[in-house]
Amino acid sequence: MSRSKGPRLSRRQLLGSSAAASLGALASAAAPAASPTAGASEPSAIAFYGRHQAGVATVPQDHLAFATFDLAEGATRHEVAAVLAGWTTDAATLTRGRALPGPAGGQHPPADSGEAVGLGPARLTITLGVGPDFFTGQLGNAAARPALLAQLPAYDGDALDPVRSGGALCIQACADNAQSAFAAVHALAASGLGVLNLRAVQAGYTKNPTPADPRVARDLLGFHRTTNNIGWGDVASLDRYVWVTSPTPEWLRGGTYLVARRIRIALEQWGAVSLDEQEAAVGRFRASGAPLSGHHLHDRVDLTATGSQGELLVPPGAHVRVAGPEGNGGTRILRRGYTFSDGVDPSTGELDAGTFFIAFQKDPKGQFGDMLGRLVAGDALHRYLVHTSSGVYAVPRGLGPGEDWGSLLLGRSG
Ligand code: HEM
């Protein structure tokens, strides 16, 4: 989808630069960085460069700002590549906790919005993805779309908002505070204006009560969110289920696919059912997080365990039974979702809140899509959920210093 809204004038053009290729010049005329203490050695900085993009196998920060973008009508391949090259420099700068450089002097608009000055790196990660709509006649790259990069099919009960769904590109910005995460989206949106126009922005949060175990944060159901997730440091499982290993396209080897679904939870209905029924729907005890077949949080889910009457302890429709690998031919996904709370749904007067579900996998339809199909058909939790957005994005491999997203995806921009 290509939308023409917004002026065809980027922040760089406003600042007197025709393209991101001029960033070097901008940097040399730079105003001083935000804080002299906010350098690469800052402990709260997560490296931007590396084999994989940060923000995938990264222990989740507390806050999310997720933005999607459209190609502006008439935007050329050269312009898009230049913006993406600029985004790379911006992301490398912002994740170090630095302010964006720009020409000094009061006669120019400030290059940096200023809102994150003094907050340091805050474990900010900026992760780029490209959707199916990135591969178009407009950019002359339609034939380069990876075969697995396609929107998911429709599922029963979907109530997808077309504006919140899709997009030619996505940026997942995560940080230890909401202000730094939003500042990253704000900066990239300003820098892309007129070439890559904002489509939708979703804020989210999560709070892990104990840094010792990142899997115990709770969701709006009141249950631990990711007890049985792929471990953040589990290299073998990440290689097996998450990182793309096929040699072509080269830009995707070491990358992954991101699926985003905004899933509203009918909290009023959920809050009105008994604790026993809630636990049967999830397949875990709410207080301890233990599977209904066990006693402790990290006990293995035993789908065959039976009670005194011969009944399955993890009932047939339990979410963990239907979503878990034994119900899915061994398939797993990396879940990295955030809670959202967006006020009140005016049509019902109920809370518009739930999980902004983000999953990373090698095969969006084969892993996530099939799992979702099974959940829609037979998950007891699903009756409390309404999916209100859907997006699939290919997440390029990580960059080395000197590389940039524009050149990687579209060839040389300069
Ligand atoms: C608002 C929506 C959702 C909520 C609140 C939710 C909640 C939960 C909870 C509380 C658990 C137990 C913790 C754990 O075992 O890790 C869980 C597990 C899981 N969920 Fe969800 N979930 C949602 C949607 C989905 C969707 C859409 C999928 C995939 C299509 C999914 C896939 C999984 C998987 C794979 C597990 C781990 C199962 C296992 O290996 O035992 N969930 N979910």
Image: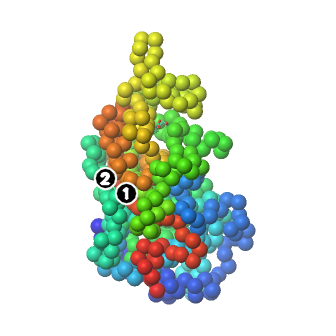
Q: Residues within 10 Å of mark 2 (few under 14, many from 20)?
A: some
Q: Quadrant of ligand 1?
A: top left
Circles 1, 2 touching at the beta carbon (< 8 Å): yes
**Foreground: 257 or 147?**
147
Which amino acid, mark 2? Answer: Leu
Q: x%, y% of residue 115?
A: 59, 67
Which amino acid, mark 1? Answer: Val
State the residue at coordinates (62%, 87%).
29
**Of helix, strand and loop, which one carries label 2?**
loop
Q: Is residue 315 visible?
A: yes
Q: In the visual, does 188 lie left or right of 155?
A: right
**Foreground: 160 or 405?**
405
Q: Quick check: 17 above or below 358?
A: below
Q: x%, y% of residue 332?
A: 45, 44
As drawn, the label of residue 392 is 1
Q: Quadrant of the N terminus?
A: bottom left
Which image quadrant for residue 139? bottom left
Q: x%, y% of residue 128?
A: 47, 65
State the residue at coordinates (48%, 47%).
335
As drawn, the label of residue 189 is none
**Of helix, strand and loop, which one carries label 1?**
strand
State the residue at coordinates (59%, 49%).
233
Q: x%, y% of residue 402?
A: 57, 77
Q: Give the residue at mark 2.
A: 152
